[in-house]
Amino acid sequence: MESKRLMIVESSTKIKTLTRFLPPDIVVKACFGHVSDLPKRELGIDIAKQFKPHWRELQEKKGTIEQLRRACEASTTVILATDPDLEGEAIAWHLIRVLKLAKERVVRVAFCSVTEAEVLRALSCPRKVDRNLVDAQIARRIVDRLVGYRVSPILWRHLKSGLSAGRVQSAALRLLVEREREIEGFRPEKSWQLTANFEDGKISGTYQKAFASRDEAREALQGLADHECIISHIDRTVEHTSAPPPLRTATLQQEAGSRFGMSPKVTMTLAQGLYEAGHITYHRTDSVDMSPEAMQGLRTYISGTYGEKYLADQQRSFRQAPGAQMAHECIRPTSWTRTGIPGGAQRLYDLIWTRAVASQMARAAYDVCKLQVPYRDSHILSSARSVEFDGFLRASGHGGDPHGSGTMAMLANLKCGQRLTLHEGTAREQLTSPPPHYSESGLVKELERCGLGRPSTYATIVTTLQDRRYCESVAPSKVKQRLEVMHLREGEITLGKREQEAPNVRGRLTVTEIGQDVYSYLDKHFGCITDIAFTRDLELELDRIAAGSVKWVDTVKKFHDEFGPTVDTLMKTKALEKRIPRAIREVRRIGRHPDTGQMIETCKARYGPVVKMGDGYKTVFAKIDAASMDSLDLNTAVTMLNRKMH
């Protein structure tokens, strides 16, 4: 019988790509992710026996497991080519256990891109399943299960059924709650900003001090009418800007969120498809390094496509994120020749391609000109810049600002001591803004900064918080603040109003009342779970397990000892906490009042639906019809409540 080798991958999407270049004796099958896990309806961990896990074959994978068993029987060698991360290593280990494979028949290969060169390289250096990586994943699975299955019933008992606690999820909820409290405690401060236009409006500048009151601003504005505006200082320089590093998981999610409005979940789904189709390298990584072969190929591509002057003088290396494991290289295209991608992933691919290519290109250079006009105890500053050499900007097609170039040409002809003719002066009232709510991508950035979670878990953390309704993405805010403005023209000051849109919270995450209550309860009784440092340290401990320096049982025991006794006590305690009322589920947060900063929401009150703001005796509310419970916009709500306040 002809010798056959079986390669098992996680996704069937890879099969078509792999069969294009694999040797004909290799048959490729997919396991579609995990084939075994802890049981769904019980803890599945024997705490008294060193936290022994009870693995069960997944019911929905019975057919897949049987197909793989038959394929294994027809093969001499089984190649486990699951993804190159902790989950992939654990899946490989479970496959050996579930399929009852003899170790001498099994090899493990890991490739970071589904390309011929990378896959054949992996096949040339097979290895055994790394038990340290498997242990790290087992430890992560067990501690997550211990929190979810032991603490969640406490929430059901003392607050409301259907709630859940999660290990990293609870610490992430803390970030959202603390930001919410910052915003609630914020009180806007007013100031006035003075600007001046010279030479028929061709040059504009800003006075470098703000004024605390309207009277001070008016006095300063009036003084401009008789002030001799003479240039005291001109500074002409060349500024250089270097390209940012290639993308990693966290920055990919952040950039896709800010540029395209993609959620972390959507971003990772699209990236998964690009990886499986062989267009990009593995997308779950914390590294910004590039392999030597890829680096050489990229530098050759840049010099050949754009010319030598666009190539960075030497290979650029980048600072790694704190705590980076650097198990893989950065996220980059597998080919430097730009590829057309079918479906909706083109924008994401272009982003990955541009960041990777630009990272080894020359710096961009800007001509910068700044001039100062002394006034009172400070000066009016005018500045402009234009692109002198586009450098890495060429990769994305970005060039200079044509308006900046025009202003630059104007400033370039001026000299010190030259008198400028005042065209117009303006004093604008302005308000300080509260810290913004986290966007989904912003929360990912903060999770990484705090050391919470890992590249493979960021999207899941954000999604879980929303699925549990602990936070929600608030409706778009279009409320406009009416602020004063004063104009000085031909020596006369005129008063007016200007409209400034309040900070738009579209796509921003706000904590729901359920989320607030769950966090308060967990922080009171299970402080370790909501503690940022404790959660971060456990992540580092899991990394040490993966490195083989710590035993997983010791880590799990130390973690469980922190909250296990509290669970035992609270399960015996009568539920004395105030339970979350059913009505809370019918509350809809609309946004914040632009003047008071208080949250506005619709809810069902004693005598019917209302829109309200504030708490207790300071509550302001207005009656609404039932249909408005889900449709009332912030602008209308503000108008209704303002009528009640005045």
Image (spheres, rainbow, N blue to C red):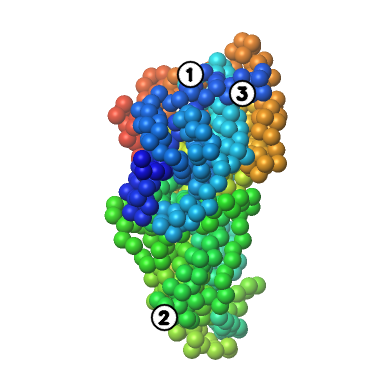
Which is more N-terminal, label 1 or label 3? 1
Viewport quadrant of the C terminus: top left
Q: Distance between the residues labelled 2 and 3?
A: 72 Å
Reading the image, the residue beneath label 2 is 406
Identify the residue at the far front of this view: 1
Reading the image, the residue beneath label 3 is 52
The secondary element bearing badge 2 is classed as helix
Q: How far apart are marks 2 and 1 (CA)?
A: 69 Å
Which is more N-terminal, label 1 or label 2? 1
Question: In front: mark 2 or mark 3?
Answer: 3
Residue shown at 43%/40% (left/top)? 76
Position of residue 461 measured from the top left corner of the image (x, y, whole percent): 51, 38
Viewport quadrant of the N terminus: top left
Q: Is residue 641 left or right of residue 145?
A: left
Q: Residue 227 is drawn in which quadrant?
A: bottom right
Question: Counting other residues with Cα less than 10 Å from the Cα at mark 1, is it few (<14), some (14-19), or many (20 or more)?
Answer: few
Residue shown at 59%/63% (left/top)? 318
Q: Distance between the residues labelled 3 and 1?
A: 17 Å
Identify the amino acid type marked 3.
Answer: Lys
Mark number for residue 41?
Answer: 1
Question: Counting other residues with Cα less than 10 Å from the Cα at mark 3, is it few (<14), some (14-19), or many (20 or more)?
Answer: few
Identify the amino acid type marked 2.
Answer: Gly
Residue nearest the observer in this picture, 277 or 577: 277
Question: Counting other residues with Cα less than 10 Å from the Cα at mark 2, is it few (<14), some (14-19), or many (20 or more)?
Answer: some
Residue 598's place in the image compared with 324, above or below, is: above
